[in-house]
Image (tube, rainbow, N blue to C red):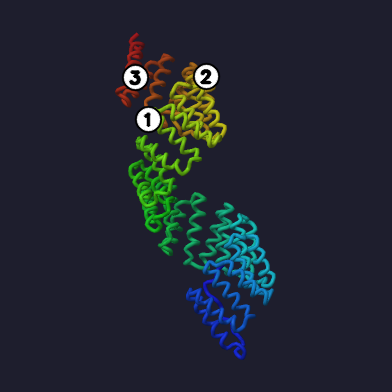
Amino acid sequence: MVRCQLTFFTFNPDKQIEANIQYDRGVNLFNLERYSDAIKAFDIVLRLNSQDKDAHCSKGLAFLNLGQYASTIEACDKALGIDPRYSRAYIFKGEALSKLSKNLEAIKEYEKAMLYDSQNATPYINKADVLCKLGRYEEAINSLDKAIKFDPKNIDAYFKKGFALFRLGKYQDTIELCDRVIELDPMHAEAYYNKGSALSKLGKFNEAVKEYNKAITLQPSDDASYFNRGMTLFDLGSFDEAIESYNQAIKLNPKEFYYYQQKAKALLNLQEYSAALEVINEFIKSDTENTQAYHDAGIILYHLERYQEAIEAYDKFIEQNPQDSEVYTNKGNALFKLGKHQKALQSYDHAIKLNSQNANAYFNKGTALSYLDRNQEALEYHDKAIMFDPFVSDYYINKGFDLSALGKYIEAVDYYSKAIDLAPERDISYQGKGVALFNLGKYYEAISAFDKAINLAPQKPEAYYFKSQALYNLKRYQEALKVCEQLIDINPKSLNAYELKTLILKKLKS
């Protein structure tokens, strides 16, 4: 890519002593990053000798570093007009075209450079950069392999090949390339960073954290390393440590909303909702234009049961994002909690109008209809939710609930079973299935389902109640009494439990 230093070129002292002095002066100014002054020096050279291809090309490189890409192309074209085989000019012209997003034209220039200097790794590396921009990673790897063939110790080639492999999801290969870079340059912070990212993708989170730590040691001002370390610690469930890492990232780059967002997410996992809200509000104070922050604030306010404030936050987001379907779904949830059922249903309808495949909107409208005892209507919306996203257990659970409410217990059992297949750790699925089986008179199967629910959530009273009833119906009164007493221990204020216990005791006495 853009070189940080220029090479000195020797001119014929008999013809161009002054030009030689000015060229060397231009090189020194360039290396001091005084690009405008370097251009002036190269212009003096060109006034003395307009056919000096090196001066034209070096001037083009100075323009490149100033971001004046059209001027780079013009200078390189002049150099190529003097020498059409001048590979260096093709390389710099290619870089300028790439900066202008003229990627295919850039590739052509790099290929011309290869034609006239086939053993130079640079045009192969630069071509690979453009191919990566275009998402053509396999081709990029082929180009980088050629660069490595010509220059087996080219760190840049190995590093960029590792990046391309990462984009292809070949994480183990990425790690091997990063190790090769580190072998050549143990101080290469980005190699440790990329290795950490690849390890994280492979689920090797502890190893990934170690690599991010190395990257941070070498480059402590890189906010991305702190952030990615935080993300990995989050994946490990180390939320407090993740927050510390996010804090470092925010300190280094306080304008990046995503850092605040992930910190808030970690706090939510610690159930520190007020602290999470403070994090989002902190960002809003510094950037009132970022509407996503209002959306996130709305979600947290909803968790805090501050529903009216949540609606106000959603409305601020909607002002700038009126076509966002999901926010209307969330607003509908808050409206429903406030008892504004009709407005909630209208909000869900608007979400669906904006995105007819928004499974979450169908689900939430279906749930609202279920709550309003409009179970037959609810079924239609739960069916749509399942159609657009068939891998969410909640959708099957709620459809099972509606079917049970309509007395369709056999179908309900099927849907609860599907929910269990998707998420076997959900106690509510077993409980719902157990109730449906109970209503079918299949008490033994119901008890089995209730046992699984109790095993998953031993402090929830509902499954104990229905299990005790099932045992009662099977005339297993002693067992029913034992389960009923467990229920009373968990929920001593349950009138239903005491009524059931009274019935059981009567049977035991008789």
Q: Which residue is most to the top?
A: 510
Q: Nearer the viewer, residue 364 or 165?
A: 364
* Crowding near the residue tagged with mark 2, few <14, some 14–19, many ≥20 C-alpha atoms within 10 Å: some
Q: Amino acid at mark 2?
A: Lys
Bin the neighbour count of mark 1 within 10 Å (Cα to Cα): few under 14, some 14-19, many 20 and up: some
Point out the image quarter for the N terminus.
bottom right
Answer with left or right where residue 9 lies relative to residue 378: right
Q: Which mark is residue 497?
A: 3
Of the numbered discs 1 and 2, the one sitting upstream in the chain is 1
| Amino acid under disc 3 | Ala
Residue in view at x 41 percent, y 46 percent: 293
**Depth-wise, is mark 1 or mark 2 nearer the camera?**
1
**Residue beneath label 2, please?**
408
Residue sticking out furthest to the front: 47
Determine the secondary structure under disc 3. helix
Q: Of marks 3 and 2, which one's residue comes earlier in the chain?
A: 2
List x then y, in percent, for residue 12: 62, 87
